Amino acid sequence: MTAQPNSPLSALHSQLLKKYWGYDNFRGIQEEIINSIGEDRDTLGLMPTGGGKSITFQVPALAKKGVCLVVTPLISLMKDQVQNLRKRGIRALAIYSGMSRQEIVITLENCIFGDYKFLYISPERLDTEIFRTKLRRMTISMITVDESHCISQWGYDFRPAYLKIAEIRDLLPNVPVLALTATATPEVVKDIQHRLRFREENVFRMSFERKNLAYIVRKTENKTKELLHILRRMPGSAIVYVRNRRRTKEITELLMHEGITANFYHAGLDNATKDIRQHRWQTGESRVMVATNAFGMGIDKPDVRTVIHLDLPDSIEAYFQEAGRAGRDGNKAYAVILHTPSDKITLCKRIPDTFPEKTYIKQVYEHLQFYYQMAMGDGWECVKEFNLEDFCRRFKHFPVPVNSALKILTQAGYLEYTDEQDNASRIYFTIPRDELYKLRELGEEMDKLIQIVLRSYTGVFTDYVFINEDTLAVRSGLTRRQVYNMLIQLSRMHIIHYIPHKKTPYIIYTRERVDTCQLNIPRMAYEERKERYEARIEAMIDYVTNETSCRSRMLLRYFGEKNEHNCGICDTCLSYRAKEKQPQATIEELRGKVLQALEEQPGNPAELAQRITADKEALLEAIQQLLEEKKIHSVNGILQTV
């Protein structure tokens, strides 16, 4: 039984929603999910992008005693949510790859003694001894598993680290789990509950149908020309997705040259640049954001009118999430794929890049040992910074297959490879506030900088706080270099602990180095994942090459949702509507058109279909009749008049 709408628990949830978020009512299935987890029932919530997932765990966690443990792989989203909670006066912390041991210890101690309500953590950190030791001393109210499809090997983004969540449940046997995802097929839905050890099946589904969103696939030989045509015809904010970082800049320059304000966004940019560009786009200063798939998670801009894909995503799941960022305000919006026949070849080429040969993977593993000068049997729990460019240059590899090989080695359990993490600068005052005020002779500029830091950031005496040197420079009137040098000096004086901005991937050895002949890449980590990857690519190709089925129904069917009506606004629905309005030629008229067309130029049925505007089935019937009557004949598939 879940809480009734007028129950004390439900009333408390509504009060918290009003107090911290200012809303009078919950949306969609939010309240059902909240009441379910509020009553300590393991719960799975299926909500499309923009459905308000964060509310479903933040509200019930505030109603419970203790800390809500939030497991999420999205570090940028993690930081944003912690920041947003703090702005609302809610105490929240985060642990993720790249933090120092000291930072992690301080964060965990704060969760034990500091009356914090949320601890965000990346799944890779669940398995560390320090986390599990500290966890035993925490009061955990509930476990939230965001992007929970990552726990399923049937899912499109399986991550082995998610399997550690079930082990955490052994340490917290009576703590309920709330799993959330925006993309899950029926088999993934069952697998999530099985792997998270749900005490009973308990799923709340929000329809994935978006009645205001028109899905369009437009075939074109000139994508950039079509892109400009769409953006000129459809006013309002837009996102243009491309496959790689280089293309984001190229397309942005093209749009700017054509008088369309645009910016580009990808994972390689520093945090300050990302924030500035995101702000310009969200405020409307920039109309178009040209981005890789690194852009979008946690971005709450309701008035996006168009999402355009210049390159095909490699799965329906990825496409559905990205397309779903259009029209969150409920007004008419468009999700457009620009498609050429060569896209299929390009997409299929990703298969060998994503799954290089096993001999190549073993070679990368061997070269990694040379790179770190790792002796046989060494390496366990070693954390190493990894420079992909330097590694490839030294051993004559290409970045894409190396990146894929390292991810497969991660799946196989030999190491943990974290993609490029952008860790903003952080400071922590190592002396109490009272002692800080007693310090003399630091100098006028140093005193001024300290005062600006204290006014700009809270909690610097109890925790590491993210800072922005550019912001401090503007507020202090100093240059960025001066701010940096002063922070370094304060750190050397042991007044603060300063960790400058750093952007680097990491490799963490999860077991000792083995000989390559003993390296075993199991079928589950390679062959089975490759087969599923190929199937997802095939589904994506089927989607864009389909010319008869309603796009919305195809997407819903993929996720196991059945509906009996066409959307009426996608390109295939509009095509059918146009045909219905046109008077259809009779079979006799079509026979005459076929004979006339073949007298002008012989051709195969497909070529005739392009030359004669008509219902395809009726045209084929006319051709068949003429063949049977021997008024036309076929020579090697080419139709000719007799």
Image: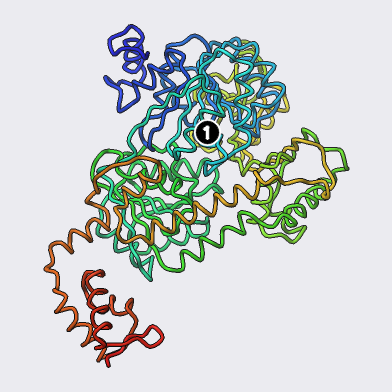
> Which image quadrant is residue 444 in?
top right
Taking 408 as reference, is 618 above or below it? Answer: below
| Residue 107 on image: x %, y % | 62, 20
Locate residue 581 relative to residue 637 in the image: left or right.
Answer: left
**Label 1 crowding class (10 Å Cα cut-off): few <14, some 14-19, many 20+?**
some
* Above-or-below relation of 595 to 325: below
- In depth, the one of 97 and 500 nearer the eye is 97
Q: Which x, y percent locates residue 399?
A: 65, 56
The residue at the point 41 percent across, 38 percent down is 299
Residue 15 shows in the view:
yes
User: Three-letter amino acid code at disc 1?
Assistant: Asp
- In the picture shown, does residue 473 fall above or below 18? below
Q: Say left or right for 114 vs 296.
A: right
Q: Which residue is mark 1?
A: 191
Residue 20 sits in quarter: top left
Instruction: In this rendered view, identify the residue nearer to me: 414 or 274.
Output: 414
Left or right, residue 462 beside residue 555: right
Q: Is residue 458 visible?
A: no
Residue at 22% in and 71% down: 618
Q: Report helix, strand or loop for mark 1.
A: helix
Q: Residue at x 45, y 34 (%)?
A: 181
Residue furthest bottom as drawn? 642
